Amino acid sequence: MTQPARRADLFDAADSERRFAGPATGDERRLLTDMLAAQRHTLEIKCGGLSAELAHRSAAPSTLSLLGLVRHLAEVERRWFRRVLAGQDAPPLFVSEDDPDGDFDGATAAPEVVAASWRAWREEVAFAERFAAEAPDLDLEGPDAWRGPVSLRWVLLHMIEEYARHNGHADLLRERIDGAVGL
């Protein structure tokens, strides 16, 4: 087996093609939701095949881990789609005033923690996907204490950025765990 000539050649071309198979032109809602779906799928790929290793920390003193990212992104999905845009009274899943970093600090290798974290993330993603699909348009707004009024369009763009940034973290975390790169 020959080594790839450059780091980019380490990517699984077939999986990358499936992730980013949506259109590159056309309807704005479709473009945004497809790109966000690709970023969500990327996180799943980067965490794939791992269980207890998901809780491995990046490097002391950081509590950054793949499982922490899953939990963090569940919180972010919940905040923007349920609380801000849908106006639901949906308390945080893993963080609190007493433990503002509970999404990362509570990311342990216990099988029940891993399972609950993935379940929460998947439930929040499913809600967000339904919400984005059923919203009358991308100009739908919700009040946010940080930004003021935000539109569904802005939230979708922000979520793409949020996932892309954290998927970069996941690249490094996964490589540290088992040497896997280019996922």
Image: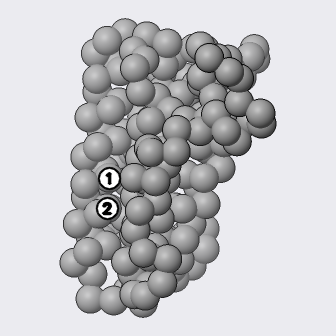
The reply to whether discs 2 and 1 touch (Cβ–Cβ < 8 Å) is yes
Q: Is residue 80 visible?
A: no
Query: Which of the two residues, 13 or 99, is positioned nearer the viewer here?
Result: 13
Q: Quadrant of the image for the N terminus?
A: top right
Q: How is the image coloured?
A: one colour
The three-letter amino acid code for the residue at tag 2 is Ala
The three-letter amino acid code for the residue at tag 1 is Val
Q: Is the residue 178 above or below the residue 180 in the image?
A: above
How far across and how far down the image is residue 132, in percent?
Answer: 31, 73
How far across and how far down the image is residue 69, in percent?
Answer: 53, 35
Q: Quadrant of the image for the C terminus?
A: top right
Residue 121 located left or right of residue 183: left
Q: Label 1: which residue?
A: 125
At horizontal 43% and vertical 10% (from top left) the residue drawn is 52
Q: Is the residue 144 above or below the residue 181 in the image?
A: below
Q: Label 2: which residue?
A: 128
Q: Is the residue 75 above or below the residue 7 in the image?
A: below
Residue 74 located left or right of residue 4: left
Residue 44 located left or right of residue 150: left
At horizontal 35% and vertical 30% (from top left) the residue drawn is 117
Q: Quadrant of residue 21?
A: bottom left
Q: Which residue is farthest front?
A: 1
Query: Which of the two residues, 161 or 102, is positioned nearer the viewer here?
Result: 161
Please tell me the numbered disc located at residue 11: none
